Image (cartoon, rainbow, N blue to C red):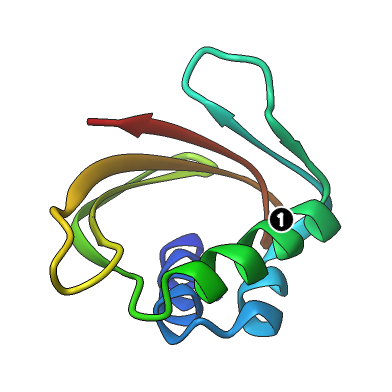
């Protein structure tokens, strides 16, 4: 499976709010950070917990892919995120760094 296909599969799982399918695409020791910052989340268990809470709080949450680029072992997605139908959407760039076929790090740029 290509890195682009893996990035799409995790986005599809995110939009389906399927936490198990989402987490399958991440390394056990993965980290999440804001761009140029220290990681604020460590490990797929913490990632799972964060998304269980997110999806419970925002049951209509979804992300729309605006563009994607693959550079080496990174996939950069520009997304528009909708927390609910009446909430103002916001945009993010998600930079997925891969180790093999798993996402090892996600750096976010939020607008």
Q: Secondary structure at mark 1?
A: helix
In percent of the image, x 46 and y 64: which residue is there?
7
Rendered location of residue 75, percent (x, y): 42, 47
Instruction: Indicate whether 85 appears above or below 35.
Output: below
Name the foreground residue: 28 vs 55.
Answer: 55
Name the foreground residue: 82 vs 27.
Answer: 82
Which residue is tagged 1?
Answer: 47
Name the foreground residue: 53 vs 62.
Answer: 53
In percent of the image, x 65 and y 71: which residue is there?
52
Q: Quadrant of residue 4?
A: bottom left
Rendered location of residue 41, percent (x, y): 72, 38
The image quadrant where one finds the C terminus is top left
In percent of the image, x 18 and y 60: which residue is there?
87
Instruction: Indicate whether 71 appears above or below 48.
Output: above
> In screen coordinates, is 46 left or right of 79?
right
Dot 1: few (<14), some (14–19), or many (≥20) neighbours within 10 Å?
some
Rendered location of residue 50, percent (x, y): 66, 57
Instruction: Indicate whether 82 appears above or below 109.
Output: below
Q: Quadrant of residue 51?
A: bottom right
Instruction: Indicate whether 31 appears above or below 75.
Output: above
> In screen coordinates, is 66 left or right of 81?
left
Q: How many marks?
A: 1
Q: Quadrant of residue 56?
A: bottom right
The image quadrant where one finds the N terminus is bottom right
């Amino acid at each position: 499976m290509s890195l682009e296909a893996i990035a799409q599969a995790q986005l599809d799982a995110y939009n389906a709010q399927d936490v198990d399918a989402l987490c399958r695409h991440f390394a056990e020791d993965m980290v999440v950070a804001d761009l140029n910052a220290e990681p604020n989340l460590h490990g797929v268990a913490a990632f799972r917990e964060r998304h269980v809470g997110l999806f419970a709080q925002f049951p209509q949450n979804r992300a729309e892919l605006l563009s994607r680029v693959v550079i080496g072992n990174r996939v950069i997605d520009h997304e528009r995120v909708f927390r609910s139908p009446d909430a103002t959407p916001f945009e993010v760039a998600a930079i997925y760094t891969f180790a093999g076929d798993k996402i090892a790090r996600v750096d976010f740029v939020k607008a």
